[in-house]
Image (cartoon, rainbow, N blue to C red):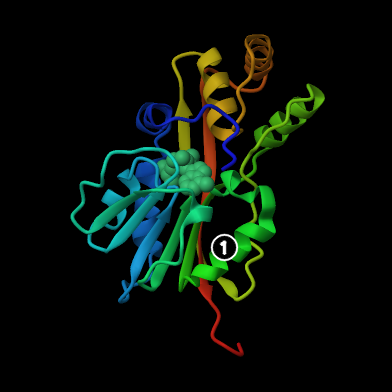
Amino acid sequence: MSIKSNLTASRLLQFKGQINNENQLISQALRTILPPAGNGILLDVGAGLGDIAASAFADREATLIDILDFPDAETALHTRQKIDFFNLPKPDRQIDVMLMSHVIQYLDDDVGRLVDHIQSMSPEAIILVSNKPTKLHFRIIDWLARHDIAHNAEQFFPECPLPGYRLDRRVDLTSRIRCSNRDELARQLSSMIYDIELDPNELRAFSDWLGKQVDGASVALPQTVSLLCKEAPNA
Ligand SMILES: C[S@@+](CC[C@H](N)C(=O)[O-])C[C@H]1O[C@@H](n2cnc3c(N)ncnc32)[C@H](O)[C@@H]1O
């Protein structure tokens, strides 16, 4: 596992429940992009709270896995497993869809290993939800580099180098992070989006700099939901 920040279930609940309205938007996008259910299961990798699963595919059999401890799924067709994705053996059932929503950055320290593990499960389709780069994103990356602070932001690679899969559809959405003040915005952005824990001095400097980049304590977060489908043999 390679979570760099102090990500916990309760911090995720705060971010997704109060700070960022993305999970409702992701669920809506998934409802439009999900291929029809087959005979297999949907595997939600790094499912987090399970709220996306409950609202986007309560009617499908799904396995929700996460490395952190979350309460059992409340949806009758969903089961939960606390496990590191890399230790997950290929399920007995065919995987119709492997969903990876804002989880790639925790898994891609070794992209070759990640691609091998995804391919060993041979899902029929893969859905990736990831943030799209913005001017502010590149300025933040630059600020972090100038301060010698390593980050672990999600990389935007919609045509993820997954041999045997092709991009079928993409849906764009924009969520909004809203905080009560700029220091809180700096804390939430650095830990939840860039996966770093800044020390108090770094956090103050980041917050001061952020104040010159954004109005108030809110930023837009454009994202993309990409459906990759398995290519037909000899395609
Ligand atoms: C930013 S959260 C996203 C949660 C959810 N997919 C969503 O979009 O609301 C990332 C999740 O990935 C989980 N995660 C990180 N590394 C993991 C690993 N190696 N195996 C399984 N889950 C992992 C984290 O515990 C966390 O719940």
Disc 1 C-beta below 8 A from ligand 1:
no
Q: Residue at x 38, y 70 (%)?
A: 35
- The correct choice, above or below, for 12 with respect to 73 in the image is above
Quadrant location, the N terminus:
top right
- The correct choice, above or below, for 198 with respect to 159 in the image is above
Q: Residue at x 59, y 26 (%)?
A: 190
Q: Which amino acid type corresponds to the residue marked 1 in the rendered image?
A: His
Report the residue marked by disc 1. 117
Q: Looking at the image, which is closer to me, 176 or 13?
A: 13
Which residue of the protein is positioned furthest toward the bottom in this rendering?
A: 234
- The correct choice, above or below, for 125 with respect to 131 in the image is below
Quadrant location, the C terminus:
bottom right
- The correct choice, above or below, for 108 with respect to 126 in the image is above
Q: Position of residue 12 (x, y in %)?
A: 42, 32
Q: Position of residue 23 (x, y in %)?
A: 38, 42
Q: Check disc 1: other Cα within 10 Å, few if <14, some if 14-19, many if 20+.
A: some
The answer to whether any part of residue 227 appears in the image is yes
Q: Position of residue 22 (x, y in %)?
A: 42, 40
